[in-house]
Structures are given as C-alpha cells and as structure tokens.
Amino acid sequence: MAEATSAFRAPKGTNDLLPPDSWRWREVMELAMGKVFPAAGYAPIETPIFEHTEVFERGVGAGSEVVGKQMYTFPDRAGRSLTLRPEGTAPVMRALLEHRLERGPLPVKLAYASPMFRQERPQKGRYRQFWQLGIEAIGSDHPATDAEVIEIGFRYLVRTGVTPTLLLNSIGHLERSCRGGYLETLAVYLRDRVDDLAPEDRGRIDTNPLRTFDSKEQATRLVMDEAPVISDHLCDACAKHFDEVRSLLTDLGIEFTLDPRLVRGLDYYTRTAFEYVAGGLGSQNAVGGGGRYDGLSESLGGPPLPGIGFALGVDRIVLASGDREGGAVGSPVAVYVVALGTEAGRAALRLATELRRRDIGVDLDLMGRAMRGQMRDAVRSGATWAAIIGQQELESKEVTLKHLAGGEQRRVAVDRVAEIVLEGES
RNA sequence: GCGGCCGUAGCUCAGCAUGGUUAGAGCACCUGGUUGUGGUCCAGGAUGUCGCCGGUUCGAAUCCGGUCGGUCGCCCCA
C-alpha cells in the first residue's frame, strides 16, 4: 500500500490526520477551545503529555482497568517511572495543586484539548492515541456547578452536529452510609441469586458488582431487573444533591435519562455521573462522559477540594456528527494568482506576498503549470478571485481580476487588488 | 488481552474456487486539443516489489504456514 517507498508505518492504533479531514477536526477543536468553553469562563490549560506514574495510580486508582492494563509506562534515564497520560483529569488536578490555584478564586475553571494514550485493541472510535476535549470545575460542590458543566458539554455536542442523549446517575460517595453500604447490599442480593446469574458474571460479585448491571447475558439481566439500585441507597446529602442537579437541568431544558446502571470506569468518581451517547460509533456509543470527583484532590495529597468535569472524544465526535464535505470547505484562500511566463511568475509571488501581509488568503501555482492548469487549480483552491498576470498586465502594472463564480473579469491596478478583495468580503 | 472477517494503483474495486505470456477497470492526477482563461467533451500519459516473510511448484496476486496491519464483536471506555 502506501509503504511502497517507506518501511515505516504509524504505530498500531495511531492515526495520521490528513486533509481534508483535518479541516473538520480543527473546526471541532476550535469551536470548543475558542468559543463554547471560554464563553462560560473556562480557561485553557496544557499539562505535560507524561506524568509520574503515581499521579495515575493514586488519582485514577490502581484497581481500575485503565491504570492496571492500559497505560504506556516507561522508566526515564534516572529510573523514575513515567506514564503517557491515559486521561486528563488527574494531571489537571496535579497541576492545580502544584501551583496552588485553589488559593485563588473558586471554582477554578479549566479546559483542555489534548492527546491521551491507552494501549487497547484498536477499533472504530477507539485508538491508542486519541484526543479529548474536557473541562474541569474545581472547588465547588454546589449542584449548579454540575448543571453548568453538563449543559456546556451537551450544548457543545449539539453545535458540532452530534445528537447526544444524556444519561445521568448518582453513584454517591464512598461511606457506608451511602455507596459503601449499597455495595454490600448489592453483593448480598447477588450472592443470594448466584445460581440464576450467567456463569461468566458470577466472579464479578466480589470484584466489581456494579458491572453486573452492564451484562449482556439474558440470565443476568433478569436478575438485575430486580436488583437494588443505588438511587434508593444514597445518603441524605448525596440524594439531596442529586435532586437539585436534576431540577436545575430541567430548568435549563436539558433532557436526560436516569440510568441507575451507569457506572464510571475511573475510581475517582463520586456523586453525579453522566455520559453522552450517540449513534454512528459502532460498539463505542459514548462520545463523552464525566462526573464529580470530590475525593481526587485528597488522593493526590491535596486538601479537600470537590470538582466535576467531562471528557469528550474528538475522534468520536467527528464520527458521530456524520460526514461533512471536505475539500475547500475549510480553505481560507480568497485569491489565486495566475501567472503567464517567468517574469509574470515573479510578479505573482510578489503580489501574493503583499496580499498575505494584509491577511488575505492567497495561493498560486508552484508547479510551473500552463494557464489552463492554473485556472483549474484556482477553482480547486476554493478561491473567490483569480488574479491573472500576463505580459500586458506586467507592462501596465495591472491585474486581470476574475470572479470565479460569476465569470466576469476586469483590469485593475495592482495596488487596488487588496482593497477590492477586502470590500467583497465585508 | 480473546474470537470472526479482510489486505491487488492515491481512492473504490475486478482478477484468485479450475496456479501459466508485459496484472486490469472506474474515479482522481498530469499533458495536449484551446500561441492568455476553470468545473463539460476529446486524445494521450505516469503510477503497483498484488501488505511482508517463508513453503509447495517448472511456474504463485492465485495454494499452504507465519507475521504485520485493518475491521467487527467480547472486554474497556472518550
């Protein structure tokens, strides 16, 4: 295939992002980082691509699948264990604590668009290097924060063309009065019905009982339909918090589906848990997910500091938002300079440069093509105007300016090209 | 990490069950028809170690094994 001239390929599970798709990709990123997120007060943050391994072991949780099986971990020359970040929240919290941002105004609102790395079996919508867009609001446990964060993610997805469904749950907090006690209740129920469970699910009772809710085995599903759900076992504070979050979302007109089975895969999640799902993603139906992580700061050695955030998969957004036409769609070229002959070629490059200095998008032929080929390329470039320079124009210091869509053309002085082009744009 | 399917020009694919001269098509690309004007039309042109390694055979794109990659499902998650 493409390896005809090279022995190298991108590593398994990684992708080269090429035009025209890269235009769409850039558009999705800029809508988030340039518009929607900052418009709600979220400032950009960029943390290192690798961290000390302990940040994830202690932040995300050594027992989680991601930390246990999927991380790219390697020693540096000093023997320190480093890890390519598999997710964005723990590094953001680490940076916040390191720089004492929690001593400033709260909540601290941050947004990122960064590559993440997990060594999994690649599939549609699941790659070893993938980009996540996320926001974090740290320092407030007020339900309005939950509602704000969830609404921003929802509205952003709609703006990209995804039609998300919001799944919502509360998984309480770790104490016995709340999730801790519920897990015991659930385990007792499951042990009671162990013979009715599908054999492959029986082992989960002790390892991760919540996951039995996700089983695809018919036998297990019947059991789980009658199983106790966490929403009935939340402590008063967590229940009240969740009530308020739901009420606020309803106020904002955000529809959601309560899903008592919804669990998050990373250990730091508490209370509000949510997921945005969409079609078009094959077996990966989540475009993004998030939740509250009120214990994360402390597990990284910081002070008690509640927080909530989400992460969205850029690749999945692009997949779920359907096919857009590519090509010149994202091209900012306004003028294509056509030159006839060597001398005109020099003038063409000069004109192109002058226009570019004024921030006008300009392209021109660099292949020595004949005029016919240049005109074809002009159309292909997406330019509005073709600026033609031949012997006659050279002599009179003029340019033939042709409107490519309409076809009409006229001679204008070289100095006036920028002015005319800018007029047409406004 | 486990299982199913797939791998021929830049792209989409035919050819492979019955191995046999220079491996094809459409699209895209380049040049010319139009000595200075684009999306149509016509003529011509360039492009592949048939994913890679090995085996069977006088001979392999075609049969066999391995490997790498992709894809779908499991798992996990964004």
Image (spheres, rainbow, N blue to C red):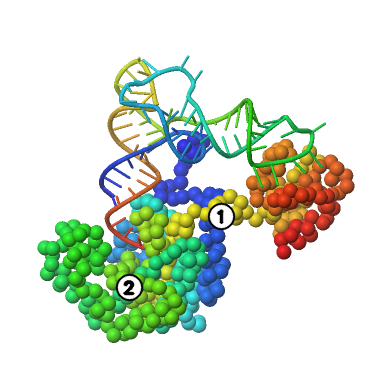
Element under disc 1 = helix
Element at label 2? strand
The nearer-to-camera label among 2 and 1 is 2
Mark found first going from the N terminus, 2 or 1:
1
Q: Nearer the viewer, residue A311 or A83?
A: A311
Please give the chain letter of the residue carrying mark 1.
Answer: A
Label 1 CA crowd tier, 10 Å (few <14, some 14–19, many 20+): some
In the visual, does A371 lie left or right of A315? right
Which residue is depicted at the point 13% across and 63% down?
A196
Q: Name the residue under label 2.
A: A258
* Residue in the picture at 27% in, 83% down: A235
Residue under pointer 1: A23
- Residue A184, how many percent across, how many down? 19, 74
Residue type indicated by callout 2: Leu
Q: Find the distance from the CA under tag 2 to the CA under tag 1.
A: 36 Å
**Of residues B32 and A32, the one drawn nearer to the viewer in this rendering:** B32
- Left or right of residue B51: residue A26: right
Is circle 2 on the same chain as circle 1? yes
Identified at 47% across, 56% down, the residue is: A322
Above or below: residue A425 compared with residue A391: below
Position of residue A411 in the picture relative to residue A327 (left or right): right
